[in-house]
Image (cartoon, grey):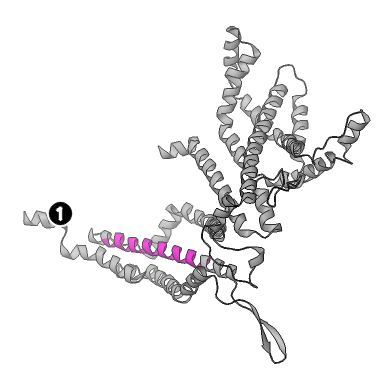
Amino acid sequence: MQQLAMERSGSPNTKRYSRTAALLSVLAMGLGQLYNRQYMKGLLMLAFYGFGIYTAVTRLPHALWGIVTLGETETKLRKVGKLYKQVMGDHSIFLLIEGLITVFIMIVFVWLYVIAVKDAYHTGKLREEGGKPNTFRQTMSYVASYRFPHIVLTIPMIGVFFFTVMPIVFMILVAFTNFTRENMPPAHLIDWHGFETFRDIFRIKAWSHTFYSVTLWTFVWAVLATLTGYFGGFAVALLVQQKGIRFKSFWRTLFILPFAIPMFVSTLILRNIFNGQFGPLNQYLSLLGFDKMPWLTDPMWAKFTLVLANFWLTFPVSMLMIIGILTTIPKDMYEAADIDGASAFQKIALITFPSVMHAMAPLVIMQFVGNINNFNIVYLLTNGKPVNGDFQFAGDTDILITWLFKLSMEQGQYNFASVIGIFIFIVLSVFAIWNVRRTKAFKEEDA
């Protein structure tokens, strides 16, 4: 029995490898690998450990100080002799960015540290079981054979980490500061002021009125732009694919032309066409005896013009995709419907539309999300105008993303722009995650 218990628990000598290797790795990254006789691997980890410790000792304290204080010394003029010279102080934004980069590097370092400890422990377990640790060449061969996808994915992951996650974190942090044009570094230091900007958005009437109105129009715009583009493409696709329609390739090519022209060019052309005074559209209306229409100067007409222009630019894409889906619907279904005496409308409503919608639903949702963030057409066609005097730095056709642009690039209200950016990020993230979780690929992976 004593022998059986020893076999189950392992002898004291064999337990020592995994625990000792893990403890040594905790003390210093790479020591556990050296203990496991993986000398090259251990030396490389020790070198990385030295870099991490050097960064932690020399950079991390200053980074944390910069994030916490955002600087303590303002830029000022100092009299040197008979002249005044500008003495540069702390730059709050640079301190915040440098601090974030250092903190992110340390997070990566800690993550790799944990992996090294686990690796030393598992290699020790292998030795306890009588196995032989891999040599450096065997490790590299294993990584090249079985971990190559992970290595390739590491590069875009680093890009996502530093160019997507870090800007989002920076934007969130700016929302909690008083960073405006009046407090622009390096002339001034910015300070943390908690949820003050969030409260101002809802407490100050001018801001809250603008926020609610622009948000409401953003969602109305996204719904209208998505539905008109989708159903417009659906209708054109049905017409082009009808029996008896000749030169189908010609019609498909003709209708795709609006998409083939750069959107920037098309939007500027539409802006001139809808010009209230000199646009050709109003000129033709005058020749026909109609009054000129305020396409871009009246709030309601400007919104209508935006939806109309977006329809013209987006329906070709929907048309092409729906034509592709229509070719996959079995003809047997239509023949069975004909036998049952179904009308053309019933065949569209009960066969064609459900089949198309089943395939297009995720794309329609993503188009809706894209239209919430559709900066180009709004900015290029109306620039958010006409101006609304009751709004805070926004026009009647501004959506959240164009209002954010004006707040940051034109008005210097960076903290308010960050709050709007956080709101947009939350909305888009919810829709994107919900849409991804509905995809077949995600469900198969989940199963």
176 and 249: which one is in front? 176
| Image coordinates for residue 82, horizontal then vertical, percent | 72, 91
Q: Residue at x 80, y 45 (%)?
A: 268
| Vertical position of residue 264 compared to residue 183: above or below | above
Q: Which residues are magenta?
A: 101-124
- Residue 118 covered by magenta stretch: yes
Res. 15 image quadrant: bottom left
Q: Residue at x 90, y 32 (%)?
A: 284
Q: How many numbered marks have been drawn onto this rendered protein structure?
A: 1
| Image coordinates for residue 301, horizontal then vertical, percent | 77, 36
Three-letter code for the amino acid on which mark 1 is drawn: Arg
Q: In what element is the residue under mark 1? A: helix
280 and 133: which one is in front? 280
Q: Is 37 positioned to the left or the right of 375 in the image?
A: left
220 and 117: which one is in front? 220
Q: Is 444 positioned to the left or the right of 411 in the image?
A: left
Q: Is 191 positioned to the left or the right of 261 in the image?
A: left
Q: Residue at x 84, y 35 (%)?
A: 293
Other residues around mark 1 within 10 Å, as few (<14) / some (14–19) / many (≥20): few
Residue wearing tag 1: 8
Name the image quarter holding the C terminus: top left
